[in-house]
Image (tube, rainbow, N blue to C red):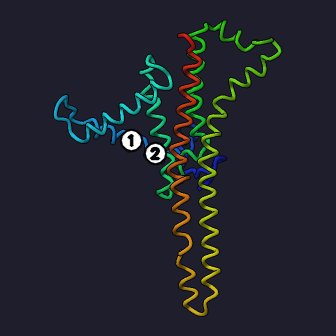
Amino acid sequence: MSVNIHGSPILYTIPILGGINITSTLVITWCVMIVLTLLCRWLTKDLRVKDISKRQAVAEYLVRMAENFVLQNMGESWGRYVPFIAAIFSLSICSSLTSLLGLHPPTGDVSTELAWAVVVFVLITYHNIKSSGLGGYLKGFTEPIFLMTPFNVLGELFKPVSMSFRHFGNIVSGVVISALVYTGLMSVNHMLFGLLPGKVGELLGSIPFLAVGVPAVLSLYFDWFSSFMQAFIFCVLTMVFISSAAGEE
């Protein structure tokens, strides 16, 4: 097994398709998407107008939340983006939470966020050209003066980069900090109980007493709160950039 530049282990390659690497990021991402798809199919099964089931009530509640989230940030005319934003939001959270299963989260691989950001960048460019025309879009890079053109181009290109690295950095930092704290507590636990004589010290030193409470508290922040916040921030930036690019469209 080899490792790619993002630290995601390469499971195997497909020679007939140009040696495409199948990494753990791809496998876990596809598993998350399959689970989300099956969950959506289950929640929307046997929909009714009257006497709805609890399952349908949950589905309708989630849809209303997604609609309110998008319409409040983008405006009433942007309802078509509800499925897109909801898909990114749910995929981001669920991908990050796979760390609770002891897996390397797909959001801990920068290629995941960069792929999402590239899609967002294409949508931003599309709405910019649609609202201003190709000539107006290109002319915008020369404002307020022509000398600013290179910086304006770089600023536009760095949008997806900044979005992806912000998300990636926060997820990876949480994984690294949690691992360091857990390892440190295990060492302190072994050192303290190792002071006890004989087999008693060895036995108690092997039981992670100190590594129970603190990592659990850190998990509440890094695995739950931080996962939610990073998905929220990424989606809000997506909506702001797209709606701003559209202007008066």
Of residue 186 and residue 27, the one placed in the foreground of this image is 186
Disc 2 marks which residue?
Answer: 94
Residue type at numbered disc 2: Cys
Residue farthest left in this picture: 51
Quick check: 179 above or below 111?
Answer: below
Of residue 50 and residue 142, the one placed in the foreground of this image is 50
Number of numbered discs visible in the structure rendering: 2
Q: CA distance from mark 2 to mark 1?
A: 9 Å
Whether the residues at callouts 2 and 1 have beta carbons within 8 Å, the answer is: yes
Residue farthest bottom in this picture: 198
Q: Is residue 52 left or right of residue 31?
A: left
Residue in the picture at 52% in, 37% down:
232
Q: Is residue 142 left or right of residue 40?
A: right
Q: Residue 36's mark?
A: 1
Q: Picture coordinates of residue 3 (x, y %)?
A: 63, 52
Residue type at numbered disc 1: Leu
Residue in the picture at 74% in, 25% down:
154
Q: Picture coordinates of residue 121 (x, y %)?
A: 60, 25
Which of the 4 image quarters holds residue 245? top right
Q: Earlier in the sequence, mark 2 or mark 1?
A: 1
Residue in the picture at 41% in, 31% down:
66
Of residue 107 and residue 248, the one placed in the foreground of this image is 248
Q: Secondary structure at mark 2?
A: helix
Q: Picture coordinates of residue 99 (x, y %)?
A: 51, 54
Q: Picture coordinates of residue 224 (x, y %)?
A: 50, 50
Q: Residues within 10 Å of mark 1 (few under 14, many from 20)?
A: some
Quick check: 212 above or below 55?
Answer: below
